[in-house]
Amino acid sequence: MNTYDANRQVFHLQSAARRPMDIIFQISNDGVAFRYNFPNLDTSVFRLTAEASSFNFLPGTRAWLQPMSVAKTGRESVNPC
């Protein structure tokens, strides 16, 4: 049996054009993740054209990072899955 416990926090933001965007953070004892969510009720397509996230860790911090796969290169061209 696997158990996963984490804390989640959602920050509700909006663009200069007043369009809503959420950033969802999920933090556990051994990891941190975040994702963008666009809580629209319409069928608009949103594209992030730049990413400016950065991390500043304390000296001595241990970390594990997973390299990002090239899109559409996995089995049945559905990578990442």
Image (cartoon, helix red, strand yellow):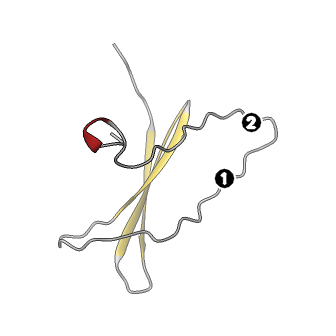
Q: Nearer the viewer, residue 33 or 51?
A: 51
Q: Which residue is located at x 34 percent, y 38 percent? A: 74
Q: Which residue is located at x 47 percent, y 51 percent? A: 34
Disc 2 target residue: 61
Toward the bottom, the furthest residue is 17
Q: Is residue 39 above or below residue 70?
A: below
Left-right relation of 55 to 51: right
Q: Which residue is located at x 25 percent, y 39 percent? A: 76
> Helix, strand or loop at disc 1?
loop
Q: Which residue is located at x 54 percent, y 36 percent? A: 31
Toward the left, the furthest residue is 42
Give the residue type at disc 2. Answer: Thr
Residue 65 placement (x, y as % from top left): 59, 38
Left-right relation of 66 to 39: right
> Helix, strand or loop at disc 2?
loop
Picture quadrant where residue 60 is located: top right
Disc 1 target residue: 55
